[in-house]
Amino acid sequence: MACLTAMPPTQPRASAPDRRELLKLTVAAAGTLWLPRSAWSQPRWTRDPFALGVASGSPAHDSVVLWTRLLPAEPLRGPVTLRWEVAHDEGFSRVARSGQVQALPELAHSVHAEVTGLAPDRWYFYRFMVGDAVSPIGRTRTFPAPDANPDRLRLGYASCQRWEHGFYSAWHHMRAENLDAVLFLGDYIYEYPGAVNAVRAVTGGWVLTLDDYRQRYAMHKSDANLQAMHATCPWLVTWDDHEVQNDYAGLHEGNGVLGMGTVADFAARRAAAYQAYYEHMPLRASVLTQALAGLARGAEMRIYRQVPFGRLASIYLLDARQYRDRQPCLKDGKAGGSLIDPAHCADWGDPQRSYLGREQELWLDGALARSGGRWNVIGQQTLLGMRDARPGPGQRLWNDGWDGYAAARTRLTDTLRHKQVANPVVLGGDVHENWVGHIKADYADAASPSVGVEFCGTSISSRAGGVAQVAERLTENPHFVFADAQYRGYGVVEFTPGQLSTTLRAVEDAKNPVSGVKTLARFAVASGRPVIERV
């Protein structure tokens, strides 16, 4: 685990001895090391300290991150030592690895145990223990070795789980899908204080401070279905806007509702939001490139990365919020997204503008060019393909997504085409609707060749607003072959050497906590042929 060199920005700076002690405790969190006697003191539990469950993520062929956060009835003040075990069997009779990890108050008593030395392509069970309390048992896995040739990869992809809009029955049904991993593509929480016609109430008001973000994550993670899915298999995660603020762009503030939910120091708010995200996700400590103190100074939190699944697939998780340029042609000069007419927006085609940031663009370009995966799976926040909202002549495009960054999208599609990237597949979320389509080399040319395929998923619970416009927009944008805005749910995509198959799963009623689920549609794509076929 990376070393923390300073306290969070909401705390006074520690003295030099305190920083050295924090350094020692944090290094100790990586494994079984000597700890001072004070670090082994254990509080007495009056209720289960593992109320937020357990999770695993960031899988590699020989390691995985195990996560939990202690949340007892009484506040914890100092560090607490937890033990962890990883076993071959659910009864823990054959323990593969074990160690200790520190739950530090500076990180809200969350832990990220980076377990190394595991066998590739193997399922394991894990648990945490503190005092006489034992966590729920989680199940996780390592990915195949880089030179292995696995015959299958089965991924679930999902996004957008606004608490007030519905229950998380989608997660309940996803547990039965026999997945290797989950790709969560953004909007794990929402920073709003409430919703009209809420299905269930949110606690707290606008999420603005580090404590606010911690409380909102704790509320979401209290959901039993979400906890159970986290404990079923490892997760690969990225964020979108609501983990910070609606429609924010880099260090530019987004918008609230009716002018509410804004702050005087957006950089400080973003730093607090990023810290809370790290505290609640199974991420490696290396994402904190300059530790917690760096977040306060505006240092990046690098969550974009490449994850190989043997030679079958390479997964790329992107960050389309932290480094982007501001949206073009802001409506009435107000921050946030809006529909624009590109014919009357000079900035729209500016080749210097970036959606991912130049450094991430160059990284992705190089990673795709060097990829040895049969399938190249890009997990990112939203719809890649152009979606014109104006019937007939002219265009109306949403400037907060790829449609607002035309030159950046062209650079990506040029990479896919000119570097002959094998079988590109883009997975997205954000729009609360299912959209399935072909990635075009040039969206201005209807005869342009397809260079890949995309499956943009609906939400876990967040409502959609464009049900009535779906048929019309499909007609206007023929590179899409399917769309649906009525249902909430998730997608399952299975890769084999010869083809991928995608199943769109829809809960019957997100307002029902025990809703059933059904298959909305199925699609197949043959390896080497970027053509979507409905099956």
Image (cartoon, rainbow, N blue to C red):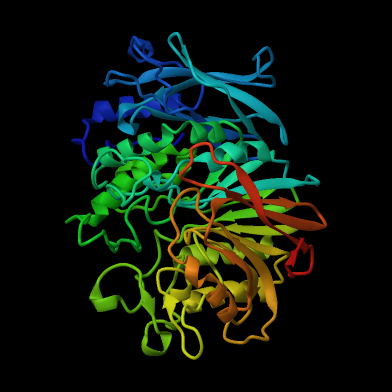
Q: Is residue 292 left or right of residue 456?
A: left
Vertical comparison of 131 with 202: above or below: above
Using the image as rendered, state which of residue 349 and residue 400 is in the foreground.
400
- The residue located at (40%, 30%) in the rendering is 110
User: Residue 306, position in %: x, y?
Assistant: 59, 52
User: Residue 153, position in %: x, y?
Assistant: 72, 46
Using the image as rendered, state which of residue 514 and residue 383 is in the foreground.
514
Question: Can I make out residue 32 in this image?
Answer: no
Vertical comparison of 486 with 138: above or below: below
User: Residue 144, position in %: x, y?
Assistant: 73, 41
Vertical comparison of 284 with 358: above or below: above
Q: Is residue 36 left or right of residue 237?
A: left
Q: Quadrant of residue 338?
A: bottom left
Question: Can I make out residue 189 in this image?
Answer: yes
Q: Is residue 206 left or right of residue 430?
A: left
- The residue located at (64%, 57%) in the rendering is 377
Using the image as rendered, state which of residue 202 and residue 286 is in the foreground.
202
Q: Is residue 122 left or right of residue 460?
A: right
Using the image as rendered, state which of residue 219 and residue 111 is in the foreground.
219
- The residue located at (61%, 41%) in the rendering is 174
User: Residue 95, position in %: x, y?
Assistant: 65, 16
Count of numbered badges drawn on the protein? 0
Q: Quadrant of the C terminus?
A: bottom right
Vertical comparison of 534 with 291: above or below: below
